[in-house]
Image (cartoon, grey):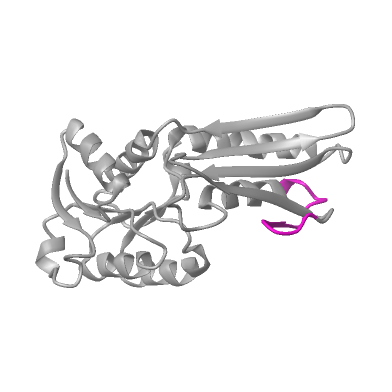
Amino acid sequence: MKIALIGYGKMGKEIEAIALQRGHEIVLKVNRSNSETLKKEDYLKADVAIEFSTPHTVIKNVEQCFNVGLPVVVGTTGWYQHFETVKEDCLKKNGALFHATNFSLGVNLFFKVNTYLAELMNKYPDYNVSMEEIHHIHKLDKPSGTAITLANQVISKISRKTKWSIDEKKEETLFIKDVREGEVPGTHIIKYQSAVDDIEIMHKAHNRKGFALGAIIAAEFLKGKKGIYTMNDII
């Protein structure tokens, strides 16, 4: 498989290393130095694009892929307020989009555990639920896309919580404590606390390899397809 890497930072380099190990070829690397000079034929060297850039550039990058008919896997977060517009553009142009707030297979299994636990805990109002997410100091979006996914899962199952916030601690609000420190790849904790005990689940990434591998598996899945897909189509 021939891959275009859109965004060639730490994640891009990790994806490149694992892609080469799996027998794939990197035919294009897009970054700030060349993004404005590339032409359609540059993108069409690839079978699929993997996009890990920034919340400020992701929409433009995805639109470019749709415009040239290149399937795109999007790992950037912080853009989902524009998802309906991107979805409409993808379908209008008969494109292919694979999106996820987190490509780690472990995190996506954690999503399922989180949903199931929240469904159980809805019956026990003595437990208050809160969250904490910890990431490296370079991460731009707060809270993380993964934390938002986890929070929305909890809210969909816990009737006493109607929204999430990183600022307020009201009874009806799921509070998310967001921490930025060092080079932490990503830790997410959901805690249920009562007067008698606590129940806590956690996912802790040790490095970026899990995210990179998941993105490549998604690209392998997306090649040759049309439409919109998520990790639920793989797991």
The secondary structure that most of the magenta stretch takes on is: loop
Quadrant (top left, top right, bottom left, bottom right) of the N terminus: top left
| Magenta span of residues | 156-169
Find residue 136 and report its horizontal and vertical position in percent.
46, 45
Residue 162, magenta (yes or no): yes
Q: Is residue 234 magenta?
A: no
In percent of the image, x 78 and y 52: which residue is there? 161
Looking at the image, can residue 141 be seen? yes
In this rendering, the answer to whether 149 lies above or below 199 is below
Relative to 55, is 96 on the left or the right?
Answer: left
Q: Could you tell me if residue 94 is visible in this image?
A: no
Q: Quadrant of residue 163?
A: bottom right
Identify which residue is drawn at 42% across, 63% down. 55
Query: Residue lying furthest top in this view?
Result: 197
Q: Position of residue 173 (x, y in %)?
A: 77, 55
Using the image as rendered, state which of residue 182 and residue 66 is in the foreground.
182
Quick check: 8 above or below 185? below
Q: Position of residue 233 (x, y in %)?
A: 44, 43
